[in-house]
Amino acid sequence: MNDTNYNGWTNYATWRVNLELFDGGYGYGDGHACKELAEALIEESTSPGFGRDYALAFLADVNWHEIAEHYQDEESEDAA
């Protein structure tokens, strides 16, 4: 993580999505898999409408590669 603009993460959206959706082990996989999982979690836990639309739009600012890399690094450390 070279860019540390919000609590060690690229931006607020990346930090918040990691904290709320992935902290605890859901973040394994590549960036695309992380994004798909986040979208599915939001769609499964919300009703269609304004709130869901905003939550899904918020995901556009997330650095998915950074989240995936974080968990890949963590997994590598655990294996060592």
Image (cartoon, rainbow, N blue to C red):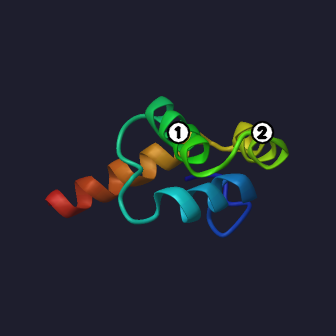
Q: Residue at x 15, y 58 (%)?
A: 79
Extreme front residue here? Answer: 47
In the rendered structure, the answer to whether residue 12 lies left or right of residue 34 reads: right
The residue at which mark 1 appears reads as 40
Q: Secondary structure at mark 1?
A: helix
The answer to whether residue 11 is visible is no
Of the pair 57 and 5, the residue shown nearer to us: 57
Residue 75 on image: x %, y %: 26, 55
Q: Residue at x 44, y 53 (%)?
A: 70
Label pair 2/1, CB-CB below 8 angstroms: no
The answer to whether residue 67 is above or below residue 74 is above
Q: Which mark is residue 57?
A: 2
The answer to whether residue 15 is above or below residue 34 is below
Q: Residue at x 73, y 39 (%)?
A: 48
The answer to whether residue 17 is above or below residue 66 is below
Q: Amino acid at mark 2?
A: Ala
Of the pair 80 and 11, the residue shown nearer to us: 11
